[in-house]
Amino acid sequence: MSAASVIPASVLSLVLLAPSLQAMNTADVVSQGAVKESRYVLHRVGATSEQMDVMQTVVRTTIPDQIKTVGTALEYLLKPYGYQLDDEGDETTQLDFYVLLTRPLPEPHRTIDPMTLTDVLNVLGGDSFEVVINPVLRTVHYRLKPGLQNYVGETDREKAQAIWFESIEPEPDITQKAPLPMTVFGYGPVKPGDTLSDIVLLFDMTDFTLDQVLVHAFRANPDAFANGNMNHLIVGAYLSIPPLNSDSLPPIEASRLVDEHCHLWLQQVQP
């Protein structure tokens, strides 16, 4: 380990690694379906569980303040994963869905950290709605749970439908907003006890997942970390974090990289 003072960041998640590389020869690597990326890190060949089922992706994000309703929050969360709302139709069950879509987003539901995408959908549906996922069309729908129909009248349903289609936010504040000024966020010097996750949360980068911001901050400040690891933040270092843009690393890739760094750090610091 570097002679510089280093601080481990919060352990965000773990990934499963194959047995120690030092005990494996080429035949072992091939037989286990893995490839070597570094002295400490071994990756299995093949798709990840998140790639096979994006609904099992672990989500870490904060829903921006400009999003006010459950419906627009759902659209914001689903878009990176290729899913969309099934919000067309006039059946009674569909009209019930509009009631949920037009509800104000509860403040406790703004912070998603961490849970699978399926869990997020269940949380936003609350106690009254159950989520219906169409894996073929990649759409998401909600239906009112049994026994709750009497709590919603026909007028409520029709009003909710009208409100949804009249006030659907076509993401003007997110994808179509004016470019952000090139403000560079600064932090330093790093103090004992600081972690990268704590630092990036000080800045308003809520249009992206926490993992995306962590990777962005790490790549923008390579000299602030020992051993090339985002968990080895050097005491006394200064960070300069430029704004993120739409070309940032996708959420799934960012999550994978954060997990790799976390496991490598554990390999190095644990006896």
Image (spheres, rainbow, N blue to C red):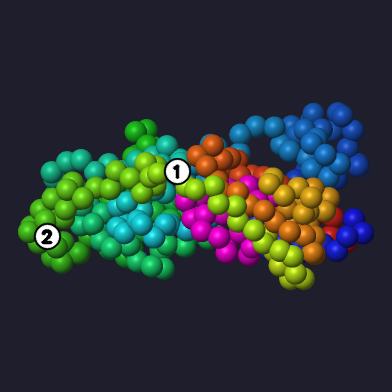
Location of residue 192 in the rendering, given as x and y in whole percent from the top left corner: 77, 71
Residue ID for mark 1: 179
Distance CA(mark 1)–CA(mark 2): 39 Å
Task: Identify which residue, 117 or 1, lies in the foreground.
Answer: 1
Location of residue 6 in the rendering, given as x and y in whole percent from the top left corner: 82, 62
Location of residue 165 in the rendering, given as x and y in whole percent from the top left corner: 18, 46
Q: Is residue 96 visible?
A: no
Location of residue 78 in the rendering, given as x and y in whole percent from the top left corner: 40, 45
Q: Quick one: quadrant of the C terminus?
A: bottom right
Instruction: Assign a secondary structure to mark 2.
Output: helix
In this rendering, the answer to whether 143 lies above or below 44 is below
> In the image, what residue occupies the spot 42% across and 57% down?
64
The kind of residue on which mark 1 rests is Pro
Magenta segment range? 198-218
In this rendering, the answer to whether 74 lies above or below 189 is above
Task: Give the number of callouts.
Answer: 2
The label on residue 156 is: 2
Instruction: Choose mark 1 or mark 2, whichever is in front.
Output: 1
Q: Is residue 79 visible?
A: yes
